Image: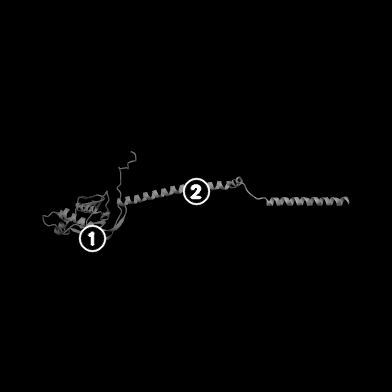
Amino acid sequence: MAKGKKWTVMVTLCSLLLGVLLMFQLKAQADKPNLMGSDNVVAALAPYTSEIEQLQAENDKLQAELDQYMKGAEASQVASDRLKRAQLQAGLTPIEGPGLEITLDDSKQAVANGDDVDKYIIHEQYLRALVNALWNSKAEGVAINGQRLTANSAIYCTGTVITINDEIETPPYKIEAIGDSEKLSKSVEVVEKLVIGLDEYVQLYGITFKEDSVKDIRLPAGTLPNYKFAVPVKEGS
């Protein structure tokens, strides 16, 4: 056999042998189960676990902030509701509703000779007595000639005029009260007849006293006094 041909045969046999060995190696790798140990699984999941924990921490933080916001919102709403109730009770809010309307006016009759002129005019004590009767019968708001009465209101006489809330008012005087008109009327009737005797003055001297039940009365808001000396007491002092 020639030397070149012999060399060719040997290379061919070596290639075949190498191919067979490679085939067995690949088959062995294919038949081997591709299993991952528990340590490897933990290692593979570690990045995801860390991310989940981070997201959970952020979620907890946001939930805490939301809870704080809700508590603050609830506290703010409670404070707002209390303020509105306080303003309503203090007469600082316009209101409307059914109630009673009373009209008082000086007499148009000429004063008889030697008679007392005071019997022919409306006095501040009439207004005060009627207003107190309305409050006592659970009136929810009272005004005189559009002047809303509050805890700081005053009705007094200055010379020949009546002053209400530091404003001079002249007759006729219209008293408006929101509440149960029947209860208001009964209370007013007792005061009008038994306390100040206006029914007699109406008959004898022509003073005007009239009351009407009204379905819709609108009262303006009252005003707060201008405090110059009083200041709130600080807590703990």
Q: Where in the figure is residue 49, as x and y percent of width and height?
A: 56, 47
Marks 1 and 2, how far apart in space? 65 Å
| Local crowd size for mark 1, using a 10 Å CA cut-off: few (<14), some (14–19), many (≥20) | few
The reply to whether the C-beta atoms of the residues labelled 1 and 2 are less than 8 Å apart is no
Comparing 230 with 180, the one in front is 180
Total labels drawn: 2
- Per the image, label 2 sits on a secondary structure element best described as helix
Towards the viewer: 111 or 135: 135
What is the basis of the colouring in this image? one colour
Query: Residue at label 2?
Result: 59
Q: Can residue 196 be seen in this view?
A: no
The amino acid marked with disc number 2 is Asn
The residue at the far left in this view is 114
Which amino acid does the dot numbered 1 rest on? Answer: Asp
Classify mark 2: residues with Cα within 10 Å, few (<14), some (14-19) or many (20+).
few
Q: Mark 1 points at which residue?
A: 212
In the image, what residue occupies the spot 24% across and 60% down? Answer: 213
Residue 200, picture quadrant: bottom left
Q: Is residue 66 left or right of residue 109?
A: right
115 displayed left or right of 55: left
Please indicate, yes or no, whether residue 60 appears anywhere in the rendered image. Answer: yes
User: Which of disc 2 and disc 1 is earlier in sequence?
Assistant: 2
Furthest-right residue in this view: 2
Write the residue at 70% across / 50% down: 28
Mark 1 lies on a secondary structure that is strand
Give the side of residue 144 with respect to residue 72, left or right: left
Q: Give me the residue at 29% from left, 58% from top.
A: 97
Name the residue nearer the viewer: 228 or 45: 45
Residue nearest the observer in this picture, 31 or 231: 31
Residue 80 drawn at (x, y percent) = 37, 50
Tell me residue 95's x, y (percent).
Answer: 31, 56
